[in-house]
Amino acid sequence: MKLSILTENIAQSQFEAEHGLSYYIEYDDKKILFDTGQSDMFLRNAKKLNINLQNTDFVVLSHGHFDHGNGLKHLINNKLLCHNNAFIKRYRKHDNSYLGLDLSFEELSQKFEIIKTQKPYKITEKIIFLGQIPRITSFESKTTDFIDANGNNDFVLDDSAIVAIKNDELIIITACSHSGICNIIEYAKKITEINKIQTVIGGFHLKHNNLQTKQTINYFKEQNISQILPSHCTQFPALVAFYNEFKIKQVKTGMIFNF
């Protein structure tokens, strides 16, 4: 399995970075674009990596935030896979600024064949889009900084992830983990009936070295995960805590991982 980092918050030399995420997955005879960042930067970085995105089999949208899906306006593809709620209007509580997608469902329907699902969706027998993640832990996804168009709390129920199965182990690819990174892992284990985790890579949505981060680290230690690669929305204090425990390396635009 090959995973290329097309957009991340920081970049290797010769590549570009923005606050956003876009990964390109090549596995099980499929090519999958997981998120598109907030601009056309993923296209420029893909070109530098000699990746032809016209050959993509699926575009998967992790959730409907601008920094993960606004790049869709620069792309045309056969299939776009996402949760039903990805297209709602959503705002930050503190200043009422908009952070949803620029393009509506109707506009994106002109560019893509959209597959909306709350349930897990098998792209192949070895690659699964998890759909809506059950919130079962006591320390994750208990508060939110977002509201919807009606002023109701938006807990980003559309936040999802991809799980790949290789050698009877799981490779879990997240985007922002608004649903809780431990919740995501538990659901991936439940859906696949596989408990051994080889890698977890992507945004963990941890901002501080607080109780939630400490409980998350304890959970990861219990899972005995071989490779842990937090990125994107995992902010510096949490990254330091993870580094102190697991000696992680920073994920940057232009990197290529082979699992």
Image: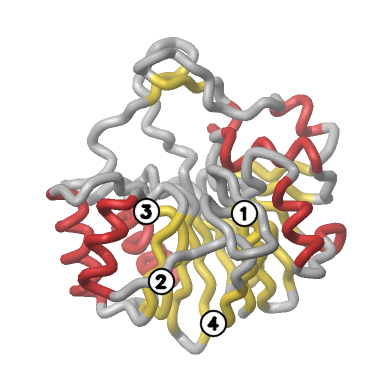
Residue 241 badge:
none
Q: Is residue 112 above or below residue 124?
A: above
Q: Position of residue 140 (x, y in %)?
A: 24, 45
The amino acid pointed to by label 4 is: Phe
Check disc 3: other Cα within 10 Å, few if <14, some if 14-19, many if 20+.
many
The amino acid pointed to by label 2 is: Lys
First in sequence: mark 3 vs mark 1? 1
First in sequence: mark 2 vs mark 1? 1
Color style of the picture: secondary structure
First in sequence: mark 3 vs mark 4? 3
Q: Which quadrant does the N terminus fall into?
A: bottom right
In the rendered structure, the answer to whether residue 109 lies left or right of residue 241 reads right
> CA–CA distance between discs 4 and 1?
19 Å
> CA–CA distance between discs 2 and 3?
14 Å
Which callout, 4 or 1, points to the residue nearer the camera? Answer: 1
> Which residue is label 2 attached to?
249
Residue 7 badge:
1
The amino acid pointed to by label 3 is: Phe
Q: Secondary structure at mark 1?
A: strand
Which residue is nearer to you in this view: 172 or 82?
172
Check disc 1: other Cα within 10 Å, few if <14, some if 14-19, many if 20+.
many
